[in-house]
Amino acid sequence: MLKSKLSQIQKETINKFNKMVEKGDLSFREVDCLCGYSDFLKIAEQDRYGLSQRVVVCKKCGFDEQSSFDGRILPVFLFDRYVSHTL
Ligand SMILES: [Zn+2]
């Protein structure tokens, strides 16, 4: 995990993100692999930065990917964290 190399604001953002996932404020959606297959092997519950998101490997082609966020929710998180602090 690369968490020790992150800046303070990056760590704070990751903590806020993880709390939103924990509370259900950020939701995920299932998507098929680029090869069209939809059977995955879960290899981690967090990514290399400590973000709480499922990391999986496609059982057919071996392509690894992360869970996809519900596209309606993520912009709200990004606006709150980045844009609102620059206005
Ligand atoms: Zn695949």
Image (cartoon, rainbow, N blue to C red):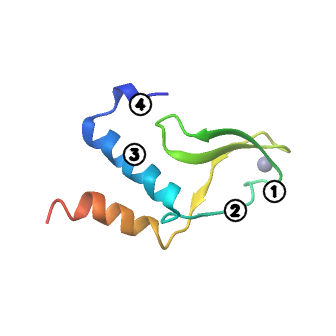
CA gap between label 3 and label 4 equals: 9 Å
Helix, strand or loop at mark 1: loop
Task: Please give the residue where the numbered disc 3 appears in the rendered image.
Answer: 14
Q: CA distance from mark 3 to mark 2?
A: 22 Å
Q: Is residue 32 left or right of residue 87?
A: right
Q: How many marks?
A: 4
C-alpha distance separating marks 4 and 2: 26 Å
Residue neighbourhood size for the residue with mark 2, other residues' Cα within 10 Å, grouped as few (<14), some (14–19), many (≥20): few
Badge 2 amino acid: Glu
Sequence-first tag of 3 and 2: 3
Spot the residue most to the bottom. Answer: 72
- Disc 4/disc 1 C-alpha distance (Å): 30 Å
What percent of the width, then of the height, locates residue 81?
29, 58
Comes first in the chain, label 3 or label 1: 3
Q: Which residue is mark 4?
A: 3
Tell me the residue that label 1 is attached to: 38
In the image, residue 64 sits, relative to residue 39, either above or below, namely above
